Amino acid sequence: MAGIGFTLRKMTGRGDLWGIMQAYSYSAILSSGPWLFTILALVGITFLARYLVTWDDLLLFRTIITYNFSFSLVFCGPIVMVGTRLLADQIHEDTLHRAPSLLFSMMLAYVLVVTAPMIWLYSYATDMSAAQRAAAIAGGYLIGLIWTVVVFVSALKNYAFVSGIFFAGMMLALVACGYLLGDYGATGLMWGFNAGLALILFGLLGWIFVEYPALPRDLAILPRQGRHYWVLAISGLSYNIAIWVDKWVMWLRDGNVDVVAGILRTAPYYDSAMFLSYLFTIPVFAVFFVNIETSFFEKYNRFYKSFQKHATYMTIDSYQREIVNFTLLSLRNLAVLTGLLAILIVLSAPFILETMKIPFKEIGVFRFGALGACLHILAMFAMVFLSYFDFRKPVMLLNIIFMVANCTFTWLTASHFALHGMGYFLAAVLTFSLAMGFLVYYLKRLAYGAFITNNPSI
């Protein structure tokens, strides 16, 4: 992600307020595009459709979108993590003519992995019409394929086009849903939303083919080269399960769930409060993307290039201390920013829930979710720093701990309404604490890790 971040950082250096606003707005879209698109589109479509379709149709539409995002993220997790590493290797080795092959290999892998469970779920297990089944399956494919394409978009420099295509897709979804919902209800909403997703997917693919014009010739590149990065695959799978496992537990354990299409369970009050709490962390993503990751990458690059230049130990040690100081100072500043953000969200929770038409009884879930989300992203940033230095197994361990803790704590607190959301919060506290401990431990051993533990020649 640091590639396009350098371009955005130049905008903040122009010295005018408009440049700063542009840079952070683009950063928010680029770092959270599919998620931000879906939240905004769902809010707009729900407002548009509230008085034009039945509650059952609206609930079916929102449930299908939730399930598609849930399972597409989980199935894409290993593919995206390994694919990101392989793309980084191609950039480093100046072999980007292989990028189209990698992209198609990732897309093919997702289609092969997700087809059987998705067709079983929507075609046989649920009670929907044929058009609704087809729309649900198409949406599952589109969302997952967008996750794979976004990996390649992050390496491009055309932030204006990327942002514009997400905005155009959101507007098309709103217009198409508004046109179709009157005559077709939930079916029209699902196909209208798919139209917006399709515009985003094919628009991004078109730009990628412009940037990487080589033909895809090796569709087996992902499994062949990716097998060396199995740790990353487990890490991506466990991380995405960790994000969703508390929702799955609540769908099973909460006594106030809605059952849709015969089998699909959802806890709309819990889900809405948690999704809304995630939305408020986007400004922190933008700050990290534009300012911190780009500056960190410069220091990181200088540290490793000093090896190639046969620098002295004193020079290497000075670069290492510079990285340690910058990383810990950046995380401290981010902790202050997210802490202030969390306090603001907690204090303004009644106003936010009233504005978003979320029942006031979910204020506890929203507050726990906001606090947990702030700690969650700090832990994620710590794992990003660890990943830069190729400490794959510690990151995998952190993600597995987060997954198990979120499942366990949510299961233990699910039967107590006042504790809803606390399971996720406690899991985030534990993961953040361990991530910071791991980061400090490994940062102090960067040179040893580079020369010994992560040296492929030893």
Image (tube, rainbow, N blue to C red):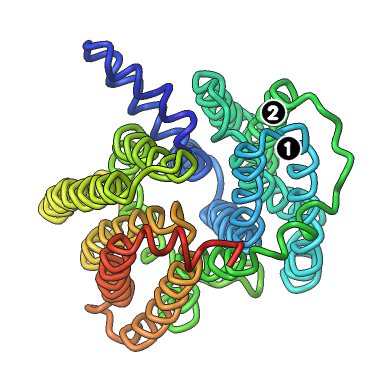
Q: Is residue 24 above or below residue 61?
A: above
Image location (x, y in percent) of residue 27: 40, 31
Can you see residue 350? no
Image location (x, y in percent) of residue 307: 45, 46
Q: Mark 2: which secondary structure?
A: helix
* Residue nearer the viewer, 179 or 376: 376
Can you see residue 283? yes
Image location (x, y in percent) of residue 103: 74, 42
Q: Where residue 3 is drawn, which disc sits there?
A: none
Based on the displayed image, in which of its 4 quarters is residue 201 positioned? Answer: top right
Q: Mark 1: which secondary structure?
A: helix
Q: CA distance from mark 1 to mark 2?
A: 9 Å
Disc nearer the start of the sequence (1/2): 1
Image location (x, y in percent) of residue 299: 34, 39
What residue is drawn where x is 54% and y is 35%?
154
On screen, residue 299 versus residue 440, left or right, reads right
- Asked whether the beta carbons under mark 1 and mark 2 sit within 8 Å of each other, the answer is yes
What residue is drawn where x is 34% and y is 43%?
285
* Residue nearer the viewer, 435 or 444: 444
Name the residue tied to disc 1: 99
The quarter of the rendered structure image containing the C terminus is: bottom right
Q: Amino acid at mark 1?
A: Ala
Extreme residue in the right direction: 217
Name the residue tied to disc 2: 208
Based on the displayed image, in which of its 4 quarters is residue 14 positioned? Answer: top left
Q: Is residue 417 above or below residue 315?
A: below
* Residue nearer the viewer, 52 or 222: 222
What residue is drawn where x is 71% and y is 54%?
136
Task: Select label 1 or label 2 by which is in front.
Answer: 1
Q: Amino acid at mark 2?
A: Ile
Q: Is residue 325 above or below residue 216?
A: below
Label 1: few (<14), some (14–19) or many (≥20) C-alpha neighbours in 10 Å = many
